[in-house]
Image (cartoon, rainbow, N blue to C red):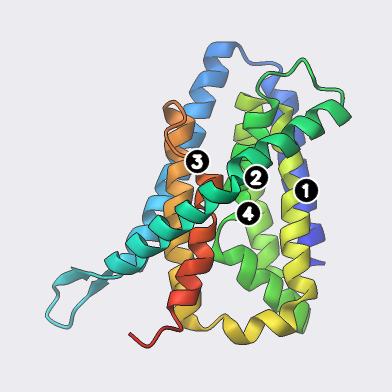
Amino acid sequence: MGTVINVALLLAGGIVGLVGGSLFTPRVQDTLMKAAGVSVLFVGLSGALAGMLSAQPDGAIVSGGSMMVFASLAFGSLIGELIDLDGRFDRFGEWLKRRTGNEGDNEFVNAFVTASLTVCIGAMAIVGSIQDGLTGDWSTLAMKGALDALIVLVMTASMGKGCLFSAIPVAVFQGSITFLAQFIQPIMTPEALANLSLVGSILIFCVGVNLIWEKLFKPANMLPAVVIAAAIAFLPL
């Protein structure tokens, strides 16, 4: 039920944003998009800092995980570029645009890709889906759904109906993890989840940057970094 609740809340937020966005002038929509960008940026930044900074007994703040972050992002981005995940996302978005009769919406693909990356990346999606699959506890995904609803509401109001279709990758991604939970759970150790959450937060930060400025990053091509980050937790370092 967790993914169903998450998708339902996401769609509800998107529909409210779509109705409200049609009442706003382009200037207000632009302001909302920048507000969404700042919010997403700080969600990613706070998650990254929480993963890298720690307090010592003497009160000193130290950072860690720099090499793991560098290796994950470098090799993950290389893999993503080689298989062109960003292009695949765009092509799927173009297919959705045609199939849903939205050929005249120039922002459809960008809205779909940006919203999808924002709501799919993160440890809550994986941990919540595993909990739902193993124990039937959908509370984490319900909480994520409430957060997704707010994010997609603002994004839809500023970017358009393409954001609503981010429900598709959420349903496929989280539903697959829930179905395979008994196989995934043993490899999602606390160290692997911590690495995944840290690198995932950095990718969310990149999405926020793209919302505020021109497209500086290709977060979709950086997605393999979260897999590499989780794998690094098993290396005998």
- Which residue is labeled 1 in the image? 168
Q: Spatial distance from mark 4 to mark 1, Cα to Cα?
A: 10 Å
Q: Residue 101, labelled with which disc? A: none
User: Amino acid under label 1?
Assistant: Ile
User: Amino acid under label 2?
Assistant: Ser
Question: Mark 4 or mark 1, which has the lower sequence index?
Answer: 4
In the image, residue 61 lies at what x, y percent? 18, 69
Q: Tell me what residue is drawn at x 35 percent, y 68 percent.
A: 68
Question: Mark 3 or mark 4, which has the lower sequence index?
Answer: 4
Q: Give the left or right position of residue 56, taking residue 15 as reference.
A: left
Q: Tell me what residue is drawn at x 46 percent, y 34 percent.
A: 210
Q: Quadrant of residue 41?
A: top left
Mark 4: secondary structure? helix
Determine contact: label 3, label 2, CB under 8 Å.
Answer: no
- Which residue is labeled 3 in the image? 218
Mark 1: secondary structure? helix
Determine contact: label 2, label 1, CB under 8 Å.
Answer: yes
Q: Nearer the viewer, mark 3 or mark 2?
A: 3
Q: Nearer the viewer, residue 161 or 19?
A: 161
Q: Give the left or right position of residue 49, taking residue 208 as reference.
A: left
